[in-house]
Image: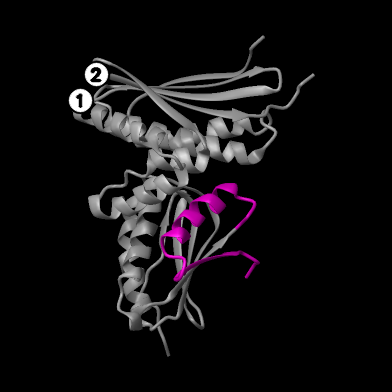
Amino acid sequence: MRQLRLLPVVMEGFSIRPTLTASGLKIALQGSADMEARPSLSQFVPQAHEEAKRLAATEVFIDVHELYFINSVCLKSLVVWIDLLANAEPNNRYRLTFLVDSHLHWQDRSILALQRMAPDIVSVANWKGE
Amino acid sequence: MSIRVVRLGFSLPPLQRWITPTRCYIADILQPVLIDNDNVDRLAIAVHELLENCIKYTNGDHVRLEFEINSDGDEAIASIRTTNSALSLHVVDLCRRIDALNAAKDPIEHYDDVIRDSLIQGGSSLGLARVRAESNVHLSYQVQKDVVVVLGEMHVRVRKVI
């Protein structure tokens, strides 16, 4: 049986909750990703990438539907994730899909900027509930 | 005749923990004032990024943030003004970044370039380009000795109260 080797991060006002899915991983980012969240997120990103490789994931979902704000410093951590993925060996690649809430207007603009970095491996979908 | 719809001023110690509450406070005030909620989001991001920059780079014991909306007929302009003192190398870098933003033909393309460059240069350095591209806020600056004022301006539509 597959077992997840990623621990959740729970802080006041921000959390990262990883779960296993049939095709790989789902990472839920919740709350407000600001300067306080930066060390946790920047540390978590390479760990999540390694875990996705270990699990031979074909898809990793980053669920941001309950992420109410992200500053540019935390956005940079996601930029780094996409860069890690884009530079990974082909057999270690997976699709990165952001699950957004279209009612949170900033998500369209910020997540689309991430998608433009690597449209062949990054996609955006509307969150439709569990 | 120009009418001042909103005027807020903050003098803050340069502590990161003040940034998020200040952004949330301004966003809450704007919610019933602006017609478009999307503009509340755009301004909240701009306030956060500009305040974060000035707190990060100040070498003084406080920074200043002023937020205004002035309306003239159907036109209204939201203004964010941050003031802080900083080392001259940081001031020069800030001015260079804002000049590059204003010289760019397409803010989105420029933002994409800044994102790519940030992977080589390290650090974040996305904030100002993000404010321009995502918030559609026009940025300018004034420098006097070691004090730098950054001004962000954006057209908005305000609700008619009467």
Which one is nearer the viewer's eye here, A15 or B82? Answer: B82
The residue located at (33%, 31%) in the rendering is: B55
User: Secondary structure under badge 1?
Assistant: helix
Front-most of residues A79 and A45? A79
In the rendered image, residue B24, in percent from the top left (x then y), is placed at 53, 36
Please provide percent x and percent y for residue B46.
Answer: 47, 35
| Residue topped by disc 2 | B146
Residue B58 in percent (x, y) is at 28, 27
Compared with A8, B101 (above or below) is: above
| Residue B101 on the magenta span | no
B159 in relation to B17, above or below: above
Query: Splitting the image into 4 quarters, where does residue B144 fall?
Result: top left
Q: Nearer the viewer, residue B57 or A27?
A: B57
| Residue stretch rendered in magenta on the structure | A101-130
Which residue bears the numbered disc 1?
A: B88
Q: Is residue B60 left or right of residue A121?
A: left
* Image coords of residue B7 (percent x, y): 56, 18
Q: Is residue B42 above or below residue A1?
A: above
Report whether residue B63 is seen.
Answer: no
- Residue type at mark 1 is Ser
Note whether residue A17 is visible: yes
Q: Residues within 10 Å of mark 2 (few under 14, many from 20)?
A: some
The reply to whether the C-beta atoms of the residues labelled 1 and 2 are less than 8 Å apart is yes
What quarter of the picture does the C terminus of chain A occupy?
bottom right
Q: Which mark is residue B47?
A: none
Disc 1: host chain: B
